[in-house]
């Protein structure tokens, strides 16, 4: 079966992993990836650039081959362990905060200055303590999600290496990503984000499009970047994360410090503030917002993220949704 996967890769690389998935025991996987991974990656990259973008409009799940070895065989369990709070959340089926939920609420939001009165947002409060996290249902419709997935002409494979608390380098992100300019194609997303959050999009970053295939994940982290954008626009005040696809299995967004995980649902958007005011009235990073993307087990995960910065915000803005 492994030989069939390799042969398949030469004629149709996008099916190679599916054939490999039907192979034999783990040791055969190890041999397969040791000898053929590089060749398959090269062939798949060619397939993506020459075939899939022209026919389908977005990349196949062959980007999953980079993390597939770690996801299937478990060679990198040291960087993603089930005994960590993040790992436990990813391995459980829990989708809500472990704390009492009697104070949580849902409402129909008319948005900033009542701009969404005719088509209000359905907002669900997922956490009322630190960090406060909200889920905006049906932020985008199915057609809008599909249109965003088809915008970039080339996603870039990303394997970002970061250090853990012990200073050891570990894999953090395995995905394909692209940045979408602020133009007519994305204007409606920014406009809707401003209405839904009540925050100005003037200093918001370009919209980041991210695709995770099988095994794709992002270890827990916080979003503020402090130095490289701070002097210009201030830090990342808030995050709006929009799910552009459902995920067959896995791919939850997990907040390990508060025991909260959210299953991706196409069109819905997560929102939270990354900074909080300290005793002196200055902004500081909210460590409780540590979050990550659990590994995709089946299917493909697409998200679009807008990081909203401090600059251009009203000095008396509310630390909540309108």
Image (cartoon, rainbow, N blue to C red):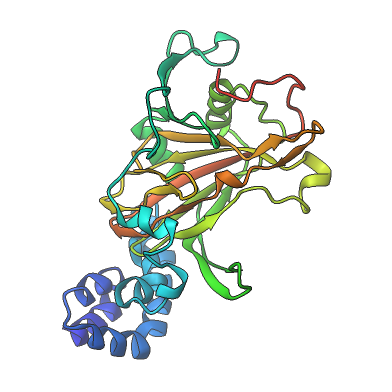
Check the image and report above or below for 246 versus 35.
above
Check the image and report above or below for 269 versus 192.
below
- Seen as rendered, the residue at the extreme front is 100
Q: Quadrant of the N terminus?
A: bottom left
Q: How many marks?
A: 0
Q: Quadrant of the C terminus?
A: top right
- Of 43 and 306, the residue lying toward us: 306
Give the image location of residue 169, x and y in percent: 58, 75
Give the image location of residue 251, x and y in percent: 36, 52
Q: Residue at x 45, y 46 (%)?
A: 303
265 lies left or right of 307 = left
- Of 131 and 313, the residue lying toward us: 131
Q: Residue at x 47, y 44 (%)?
A: 258
Res. 135 image quadrant: top left
Check the image and report above or below for 5 versus 260.
below
Q: Residue at x 38, y 79 (%)?
A: 75
- Residue 44: tell me if it is visible: no
- Residue 99: tell me if it is visible: yes
Give the image location of residue 274, x and y in percent: 62, 40
Q: Residue at x 43, y 62 (%)?
A: 84
Res. 42 image quadrant: bottom left
Res. 55 image quadrant: bottom left
Give the image location of residue 190, x and y in percent: 58, 30
33 lies left or right of 314 = left
């Amino acid at each position: 079966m492994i030989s069939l996967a390799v042969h398949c890769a030469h004629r149709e690389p996008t099916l190679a992993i599916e054939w490999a998935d039907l192979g034999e025991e783990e040791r055969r996987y190890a041999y397969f990836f040791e000898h053929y991974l590089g060749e398959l990656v090269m062939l798949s990259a060619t397939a993506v650039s020459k075939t899939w973008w022209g026919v389908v409009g977005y990349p196949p799940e062959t980007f999953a081959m980079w993390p597939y070895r770690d996801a299937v065989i478990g060679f990198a369990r040291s960087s993603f362990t089930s005994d960590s709070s993040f790992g436990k959340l990813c391995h459980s089926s829990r989708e809500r905060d472990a704390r009492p939920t009697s104070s949580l609420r849902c409402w129909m939001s008319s948005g900033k200055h009542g701009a969404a009165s005719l088509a209000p947002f359905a907002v669900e409060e997922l956490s009322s303590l630190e960090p406060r996290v909200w889920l905006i249902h049906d932020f985008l419709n199915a057609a809008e999600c599909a249109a965003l997935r088809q915008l970039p002409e080339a996603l870039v494979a990303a394997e970002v290496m970061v250090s853990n608390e012990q200073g050891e380098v570990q894999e953090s992100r395995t995905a394909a990503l692209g940045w979408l300019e602020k133009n007519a194609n994305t204007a409606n997303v920014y406009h809707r984000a401003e209405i839904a959050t009540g925050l100005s999009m003037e200093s918001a970053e370009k919209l980041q499009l991210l695709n995770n295939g099988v095994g794709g994940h992002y270890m827990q982290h916080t979003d503020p970047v402090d130095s490289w954008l701070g002097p210009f626009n201030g830090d990342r005040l808030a995050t709006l994360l929009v799910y552009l696809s459902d995920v067959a299995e896995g791919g939850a967004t997990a907040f390990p410090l508060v025991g909260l995980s959210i299953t991706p649902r196409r069109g819905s958007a997560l929102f939270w503030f990354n900074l909080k005011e300290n005793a002196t009235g200055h902004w500081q990073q909210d460590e409780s917002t540590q979050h990550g993307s659990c590994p995709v087990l089946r299917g493909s995960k697409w998200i679009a993220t807008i990081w909203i910065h401090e600059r251009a915000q009203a000095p008396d803005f509310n630390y909540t949704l309108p």
